[in-house]
Image (cartoon, rainbow, N blue to C red):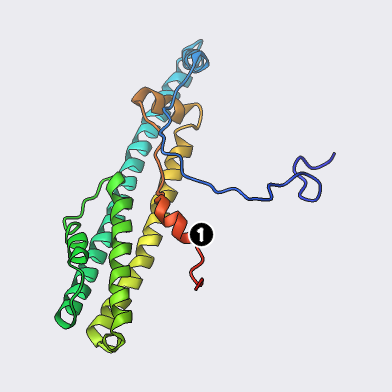
Amino acid sequence: MANELDETRDPVNESGRDIRVIEKSLPVTTDWRSTVFQVFMWFPLIIPGIIFAIMKINARSHLQMLQQKIQHDASTVDNFLLNRVNILQNTASLLEKSIKLDRETFADIAKYRSGNFSDEQRNEVAHKLDLAERSINIALEAYPDLKAHADIQNAMQQNNYTQREITAAREAYNDTVLEWNSIIYRWPTYRIVAAKAGYTTRIPFSVSQEIREQANSNFFAK
């Protein structure tokens, strides 16, 4: 039997394909077969029904704990974002003492000192901080002597470290979201419990269109 997908024979998309995160939550549903299954578990014996009821209680508890883990992972991303806000604001303050820095940079950074971002805000904050960092880097390029300033150098190193931590925290968040999205469709126990509770799939982290365009641009073009 031939392979269903054969990279040496089957057609390919020469232009490639860009993938995107779909901004849509899917509800978990069940049909009549799940109802019949649950009724069948109680007849002609009661013991299978009791066992399945205990399984549903355990599944509900697991899903509730998983929701808390998603919140914890999201909070971790927020903490690192807030830390990056503080680092960039301190860096901007150090630069402002030496040169005239665009006041919009301060405004963009200070706006996000509160933390506790929503799912929609989290992407926007990360994008705004990237723009603020770019503004700071432009200022440093214009005044190369400032790069040797120990406090500024240390702050930018901390910023790079925090950015790596944000990336790792996003991956942890996405892993937990994947676990949630997979387990709520696991039939019969989890799917029946999830459908009764009205659970839906969750949307993983995604980047803005502007970030996508920057990632696909030629950084070394003159």
Is 105 on the left-hand or right-hand side of 202? Answer: left
What is the x, y in percent for residue 131?
A: 31, 63
Q: In the orientation shown, which residue stands out farthest toward the right?
A: 1
What is the x, y in percent for residue 50?
A: 42, 21
- Residue 158 appears in the rendering: no
What is the x, y in percent for residue 218?
A: 51, 66
Q: Is residue 212 above or below residue 23?
A: below
Q: Is residue 215 above or below residue 38?
A: below
Q: In the orientation shown, which residue stands out farthest toward the top?
A: 44
Q: In the orientation shown, which residue stands out farthest toward the left?
A: 97
What residue sits 26% from the left and 77% below the top?
Answer: 155
What residue sits 35% from the left and 26% below the top?
Answer: 198
Name the one closer to the observer, 166 or 222: 222
Q: Quadrant of residue 130?
A: bottom left
Name the one closer to the observer, 68 or 157: 157
Q: Identify the residue under disc 1.
A: 216
- Residue 79 appears in the rendering: yes
Is 215 on the left-hand or right-hand side of 13? Answer: left
Quadrant in which the N terminus appears? top right
Q: Is residue 122 above or below residue 186?
A: below
The disc labelled 1 sits on which kind of residue? Answer: Asn
What is the x, y in percent for residue 105?
A: 22, 65
What residue sits 75% from the left and 44% below the top?
Answer: 11
Name the one closer to the observer, 20 or 26: 20
